[in-house]
Image: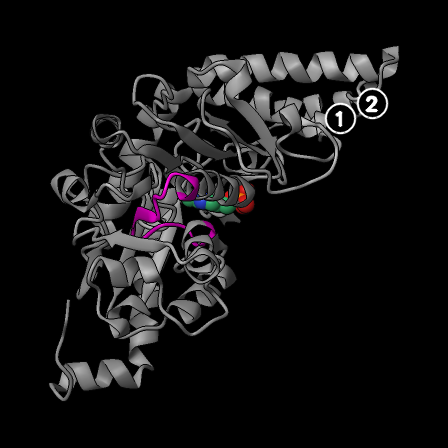
Amino acid sequence: MIYADNAATTRMSEHALQVYIESANQHWGNPSSLHLTGQTAKAAMEDARARIATLLHCDPREVYFTSGGSESDNQAIRTAVMSGLKKGKNHVVSTKFEHHAILHTLTQLEKEQGIRVTLLDVHEDGLIRPEELREAITEETALVSIMYANNEIGTIQPIHEIGKICREKKVLFHTDAVQAAGILDVDFARDDIDMLSLSAHKFHGPKGVGALLIRRGVVPYTLINGGAQERGKRAGTENVPGILAMAAALEDAVRDREAKTAHLLPLRDRLIDQLTKIPHSALNGDREHRLPGNVNLCFEGIEGESLLLLLDANGIEASSGSACTSGSLDPSHVLLAIGRPHEVAHGSLRLSLSGENTAEDVEKICEILPQVVEYLRSISPVWKDLESGKAEHRL
Ligand SMILES: *Cc1c(COP(=O)(O)O)cnc(C)c1O
């Protein structure tokens, strides 16, 4: 099997798994307990917090552990919106291609709190334009939330520039860095970021654990009420083994980041070069400003789900749109945001590589995929119409 769905989740590394098992064994105490067993767990967790802070360039007091990316995104949005509302600010700027953890939270707050949301265009290249962000910010803006790198098309936003604009305009800046942490050079301090979401299972750590970085001076909104864990801002007995395994996975990822990028770039580029040779296909998102392991393509005249099933039968595991939207007939909101027509967006494929993928994997994909596309087109009524001129080619 070739696993090419690392944007959905990654396999836990051997190291993270070992740390997890050892920690579950040794640090089983409740970090809130005052006895030695509890305090042993607490000390291990605080050590992990300090190491994560060093890796991301923030203060340990700015690290809040959560259950993952979705929770961090929810807490970040509510933190800025609730504190904004107290100051009479009811406007949020985000983008059309955020993760649903952001978009659905914003929709809920529109209904619940009457906030106003501006979603920036991401243009054909999958990138926002900083000058459009500048124009969208008003006196009422409480928050700008723009993802670091997109989970579907892998495009990387100009985070440094965005941070500067937000700082200059005195608006809180949150970034969903779930696809970026451990893969790109994420720096909380350098890029003027006020809040940042990350999730361990996207960088070979365990599922169900993540963090939200919140700049000191910003008062976190409490999403989960209960005990006084996480400085009273996130209740629940801490997932100590998960947190330790996350720290280990992030340390490995940051240490090996440049070597992994150098390994991935030629693999990604080979896939893009070979697969865009398929007639009536196109790469989604900018070729340069994209994650080193992300390839996302549209093929006219075929349907993403069928493509996935046939690839799976041929030993290639990939994804179409995002894992959350598959199963529904709606095409990906990300592909629509970059201007792909509905019928084209339906025929999309995401291949997301990790350091574990090899050149042989890539060659096998390059061999099998064109055959599968050709076969699906040969039985597709949509393709027949396109070929006969009854319908017009869009790619
Ligand atoms: C995976 C992902 C999330 C959700 O993270 P979970 O830990 O699975 O809740 C949020 N944002 C982006 C960009 C993601 O890729």
**Label 2 CB sits under 8 Å from any ligand 1 atom:** no
Q: Is residue 40 above or below residue 16?
A: above
Relative placement, left or right, of 96 versus 390 is right
Which of 243/134 is in front? 134
Rendered location of residue 383, percent (x, y): 24, 80
Q: Position of residue 76 (x, y in %)?
A: 47, 38
Q: Measuring 23% from the left and 41% from the top, which residue is drawn there? A: 139
Q: Position of residue 298 (x, y in %)?
A: 26, 62
Label 2 sits on what residue type? Asn
**Image-based side of 55 in relation to 189, left or right:** right
Tell me if the residue at label 1 has its CB under 8 Å from ligand 1.
no
Numbered disc 1: secondary structure: helix
Which residue is drawn at the image coordinates 27% and 74% (left, top)? 343
In the picture, which quadrant includes the C terminus?
A: bottom left
Distance between mark 2 and mark 1 Cα atoms: 6 Å
Q: Residues within 10 Å of mark 2 (few under 14, many from 20)?
A: few
Q: Which mark is residue 21?
A: 1
Query: What SS does tag 2 mark?
Result: helix
Q: Which mark is residue 25?
A: 2
What span is colored magenta in the figure?
85-101
